[in-house]
Amino acid sequence: MKDRITQFMANEGITPAEFADKIGVQRSSVSHVLNGRNYPSASFIQKMLGSYKNLNSRWLLLGEGSMFENKVSQVKEPSLFHFPNENETQLQNKESISSADIPVKESIIQPSENPINKPLTPINPNQPEVLNTVQSVSELIDASLANKEVERIVLFYKDKTFAAYTPSK
């Protein structure tokens, strides 16, 4: 495997120090692997494959196939922070990706039960919500007394201080 790592570094045109920095291991670890003193650990291999996404893991581990994976089209997988743009969507449609592979962009979940028996009202993001803290705290305490006991109430202030209140027993 050390020969394949050496071959890969030569192909990339990087020094052992640059390679170590890129994959996030100590330079001495790379030196020990390249000199044959140590075999690369699983963590070393994972970091290498994670840093070089197009490196063929089968080639690295077993010496089979080509050094790089031959991917005709690389489409970004939809994730929490990335939704496909029009070009990616068209490409995905051509590759016939099922609708189960595309995440739902928005879902609204309504609570099944309101603990303080007030109707749910939509929040207007342009208008700050004003709370009557005395009434709100007492409603929360009343709602929690049905089957729970309040241990402590903590108020956090904008000046980075707080006050903790414990109910008298």
Image: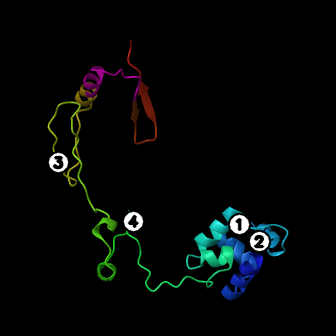
Image point 75% across, 77% down: which residue?
16
Q: Which amino acid, by three-letter code, is at mark 3? A: Pro
Q: Which residue is mark 3?
A: 122
Depth check, mark 3 against mark 2: the one in front is 2
Q: Residues within 10 Å of mark 2 (few under 14, many from 20)?
A: many
Image quadrant in which you'd find residue 120: top left
**Upstream in sequence: badge 3 or badge 2:** 2
Q: Secondary structure at mark 2?
A: helix
Where are the magenta residues, as a range? Answer: 140-153
Instruction: State left or right for residue 7 relative to residue 141.
Output: right
Q: Position of residue 29 (x, y in %)?
A: 77, 67
Image quadrant in which you'd find residue 79: bottom left
Q: Residues within 10 Å of mark 1 (few under 14, many from 20)?
A: some
**Upstream in sequence: badge 4 or badge 1:** 1
Q: Which residue is mark 1?
A: 25
Q: Position of residue 87 (x, y in %)?
A: 32, 83
Residue 98 versus residue 120 in the image, above or below: below
Q: Which residue is mark 4?
A: 79
Residue 108 versus residue 145 in the image, above or below: below
Find the distance from the CA under tag 3 to the CA under tag 4. Answer: 28 Å
Depth check, mark 1 against mark 3: the one in front is 1
* Residue 151 is a magenta residue: yes
Image quadrant in which you'd find residue 148: top left
User: Of 135 and 115, which appears nearest the observer?
Assistant: 115
